[in-house]
Amino acid sequence: MEPAIADLHEALSSARKIQEELDRRVFHLQTLSDLNSELSTSIRTEELLQSFLLVTMGALGVSQGFALVYDRETRGVRTAVRGLELAGELSADAVERLLYKSFEASENRSLAAMSVTAITVPPEVFAEAGIQIEAKAGVMYVIDQRSLGIILMGPTITGGAPRPEEKELLFAHTASFMVFLKNARSFETIQALNDDLVRRNEELRRTIAELTEAKHTIAMFEVARARIRSLVQRELQHVGRVNLLDLGLICLLATVLGVLFNFASPQSLTLLPETLFRPSSTPIDAVAAKSLLDSGKAVLVDARPQELYAQKHIKGAINVPSALFDIVHMMKLGNLEEEELIIVYGRTISKLYDEEVAYRLRQRDHENVKVLAGGLRAWESLSYQVE
Amino acid sequence: MMRNWRIGPWVLLSLVLVVSSCQRHQDFSGKYQALDPSGNPSPVLQLKADGKGSWNVGHENVSFSWESRGDELLLHVRTGGVMVGKIDARDSILITLPGGEQFHFKRVME
Amino acid sequence: MMQFWELMKKVLTSKYLALAFRLYIGGIFIYASMNKINYTAEFSESIASYQLVPYWSVNLLAIVMPWAELICGILLITGIRSKSATAALGIMLTIFSVAISFSLLRDIPIGCGCFSSVEETMSWTTLLRDVVWLAMSVHIYFFDSALQLDRGFPILLKDI
């Protein structure tokens, strides 16, 4: 009976052990399931790292944890830590060194894609990189040639190292974690590609806008070119030919320049003769003039230029050319009494010399100025004396 | 090249004309008094170096611009007349008024 | 003998002779315009002394004509629109010649006012001089082709 009871006890205790083992396995499966459902809520690497570390540490019952993903292409380092402080940002170089050391210390020295391998790295290697962790378990995982990483677990809450089943659990968690990381990376790649596409689209849009504008400008230049061409061609047709427009332009230009310059000239002229706008002087006929002159009651002034005076003039006339009036008046008529009658003559189709001189005489306070009607011709027709 | 060659002589000619006309002004500028009044008021000619001048009788005067051409002195008045003086000797100008009266101007020191 | 005439013909119709005339006539007109532009009032007296145009138009002519001479002279020398300029000068020279003829026939004792308001009383030699210039203008009109500035346009056109 005794041995049978002993056997029964043994069987019972082993059944309990199996029961405990089963319970742990169930718990482990439970955590794996938790991990999967936790990780599936995120597609961002940083969040995945955090979630993974949290769930896995809980499952293993450890107080310190460290997880790292390294992207060899972009030399990007992403880490998550719990229960410890990093001395500073991990540089890509430090991470590469760390990974190399871990690879050397790994169990099967494999870099196969989606592989997880346990590592036993001396603690000073981590200390050198600034990670103060008392690693009791560590794995290195390789997602593919591009991404790989390390996961370190500190001591358990009770102070010991994780048991082999728990190390297996770490492997399983890591394997699951890798799948999500890979997805996250794919997503990030797609995101980056999308961003790039948007940027390129924007660039394209701008380029198209610029091109359209350039096209407009070119079209404008084309029009201008054609216009200049036709202009020059038209000009060319005029070269070597007489053109009424040219003659007109010459006249117009001469008129404009002449009128403008005339305003500034010291000898400026009014556009129309001033005599045109003045009232005519009192006329006197040749017969009356003759008698007045003969009796010495009047002075006769020849207003024409001296050449004409020299050629022929009424006998006794004083030559006071209108153009030289100021000087000649001063020299010859300066002593004349203001009330003395002055009879002026001399006009042609082109100039009313007599009216001009009569006006200037009146301006010089000669009150009694008359113009000989008919001038020299009337005088001659009466056969009066000329010389 | 051709254009320069074409304009060149004219630039030179105008320069010569401008320079020479400037020099002539200075040769004759000064004050002149008519010599033989013969009962008429005695006029005084004032020729300034800048080509301006005036014909003075008593307190009356007429301004003009003047230039010399060969042995002739031209007095341009504003109203469009030209009085021609003949430079018959150094410092001596003979001016004939319309109608024939002659005035003999001699340079006087100012 | 034939060769001599051939040569004469060649010389007389030469574009370089036309060029020489062009520069000469252009220069004369520019020179002639200077004094008139400076002394407009005197030029108006000169025009009036011909007794050909009505008195209200004298001042206008005196203001405009010298500038027309100047512009034509410049166009002629530079060779811009020289054909039109020559025609304009030809018209002016014809008018001057007719005016001088009239004055000579009517025995009006005036200077021609061509270059300055103080000139020798004109005579038949004055008319002859104008007619010679007119002949030169005709020669320019028909034979001028050398050194024209606006003939440079075709080269310009190729560039565009």
Image: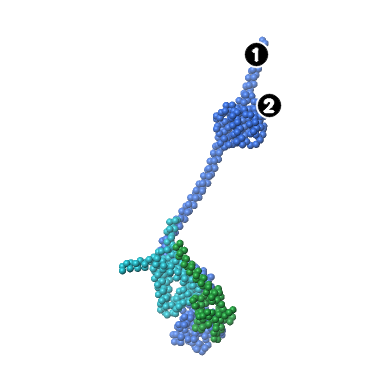
Q: Which residue is mark 2?
A: A159
Q: CA distance from mark 1 to mark 2?
A: 35 Å
Q: Can residue A72 be seen by looking at this rendering?
A: yes
Q: Earlier in the sequence, mark 1 or mark 2?
A: 1
Q: Position of residue B35 (x, y in %)?
A: 55, 83
Q: Is residue A9 above or below residue A247?
A: above
Residue A342 got which mark? none
- Read off the chain for label 2: A
- The chain holding disc 1 is A
Outermost residue on the bottom side: it is A295
Foreground of the two, C45 or A378: C45
Image chain in cyan: C
Return the residue nearer the eye: C111 or A208: C111
- The quadrant where residue C137 appears: bottom left
Chain A display color: blue
**Dot 1 amino acid type:** Asp
Q: Secondary structure at mark 2?
A: loop
Q: Which residue is mark 1?
A: A7
Q: Residue furthest top?
A: A1
Identify the hue of chain B: green
Q: Amino acid at mark 2?
A: Gly
Q: Position of residue A53 (x, y in %)?
A: 63, 31
Residue at 57%, 28% in the rendered image = A109
